[in-house]
Amino acid sequence: MAHRVLILEDDESLRLVIAKALSRAGFEVRATASVDAALERLARREVDVLLADVLLGRESFLDRLSEVTRVRPDIPVIIMSAQTTARTAIEAGKAGVFEYLPKPFDLNEMVAVIKRSLEDLGPVIPVSPSQGFGGLVGRSPAMQEAFRALGRLARTSSPVLFTGPDGSGRAHSARVLVAESGIAGPVIEAGPARMRREGPALLETAAGGALILRRAEHWDDEIQDWVIEALETPRGDSPRILATGTPDIGRHVRPALLSHLAIGRVQLPPLRERGEDRALLFAHFLAEHASPREMHDQLRAFINTQVWPGEVLGLKRVALHLSMQGARGPLSIEEVEAAIHEFSSRDPGADLSEAAARFFGAALALGESGIGEKAQIAVDRGLFSAALESSNGVRQDAAKLLGLNRNTLTRRLSALSADSDET
Ligand SMILES: Nc1ncnc2c1ncn2[C@@H]1O[C@H](COP(=O)(O)OP(=O)(O)OP(=O)(O)O)[C@@H](O)[C@H]1O
């Protein structure tokens, strides 16, 4: 995939000359004369490098540089300027600009600088054909993009938000980023239940290290408050904050939290967008468990076309199950298909409907009355106990998981216990 360069230059003829030279050198080129338009493209992650002129009309790009680093701290910025003033050079260095090109410059030199900025700041050279940053598996263009972002973010200490569907490897990637950043202190992981229980004390526990905060879409107001405060007023030994969430995270958290958290952003694509990564991951998980099973080409093709519910985690479960079977020799498509059926394609909703039909049928056969109400109580009991268990008994969190408010949950729980007292 060609690297994408954004040219920010208000001189139209220069813009055209630069664009032509960069296209010839194999880059994908975008160009604009407006800082606002450039910021939008950066925020949409449409580019890998920014090449910007300092003087844009009456505006100085350097006055807007902090906005660029806020939106994309991971991107190399190369500035061009006819003014070789101390201010330009000093400010460029201070703000972490990759290189300063004094105008007029040689076009070949410009191409070389851009190539160097990409090498230095990020393109992750896979250590094996199937592995990318820190041993993460994948070579699809979508994962290459994620590896590049990880490579750049490993050189910063900014917060990072990992988004993707459940099971896509968000927390795993966060752990890899922490390991590759050389953070020496404690690495603490917490989901909404622990965050609620321990609150900002987690920042002390992780002081000097990193805090991986999971499933941001379930954070209540209180959690959001302390995370925003931690991000807004970091102290010397504050841990690096990394968070995970679903791609629709913006619908669940306050904009202030999102803008602080997403200073660095890594998007983990769903498996359906990762093409052949599916078979690579499958082979990786078999190997991880020293499985002697072999994968032939047809099986790889089959794995690459499957829909994997539960994403990488679902695929991992199937591979682990098969590697535990103790069988040897080539793995067949039928075996994998059966395992997928058993582990990931099972629809819990269908099981519930079947159970309800059995419950109803048995009660009818016994001539019982009030069956609907009893069925409701049975379902509530199952739902509430599962929700309370996964939120460590914290009712507020359990209510959120169930999509109820806390008072409704409390009322329905007391109704249930009154019901068990009666029976
Ligand atoms: N690219 C990858 N290479 C190797 N293993 C991976 C990769 N992506 C995910 N995994 C594995 O998949 C499993 C699921 O990943 P993870 O726990 O990060 O899921 P998540 O649901 O995205 O994150 P969270 O726990 O924050 O909700 C992990 O155990 C990890 O071993």
Image (spheres, helix red, strand yellow):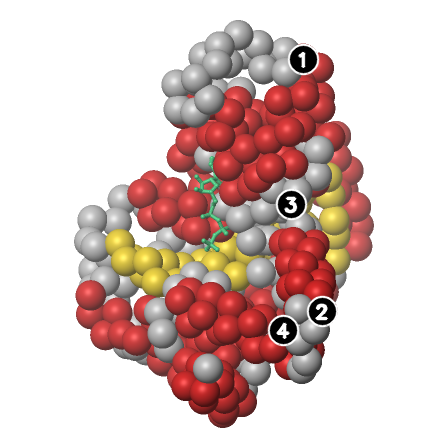
SS label for mark 4? helix
SS label for mark 1? helix
The amino acid type of the residue labelled 4 equals Ala
CA distance separating discs 4 and 2: 12 Å
Residue marked by disc 2: 364
Q: Nearer the viewer, mark 1 or mark 3?
A: 3
Which comes sooner in the sequence, label 3 or label 2? Answer: 3
Which comes sooner in the sequence, label 1 or label 2? Answer: 1
Residue marked by disc 1: 297
Q: Nearer the viewer, mark 3 or mark 4?
A: 4
Which comes sooner in the sequence, label 1 or label 4? Answer: 1
Q: Nearer the viewer, mark 1 or mark 2?
A: 2
CA distance separating discs 1 and 3: 26 Å
- Residue at the spot 48% in from the left edge and 14% down from the top edge: 327
CA distance separating discs 3 and 4: 23 Å
The amino acid type of the residue labelled 2 equals Leu
Q: Residue furthest top?
A: 329
Which comes sooner in the sequence, label 3 or label 4? Answer: 3
CA distance separating discs 3 and 2: 28 Å
Measured along the vertical axis of the image, is residue 23 above or below residue 146?
A: above
Residue marked by disc 3: 346
Give the percent coordinates (x, y) of residue 250.
Answer: 60, 71
Q: Residue furthest front?
A: 366
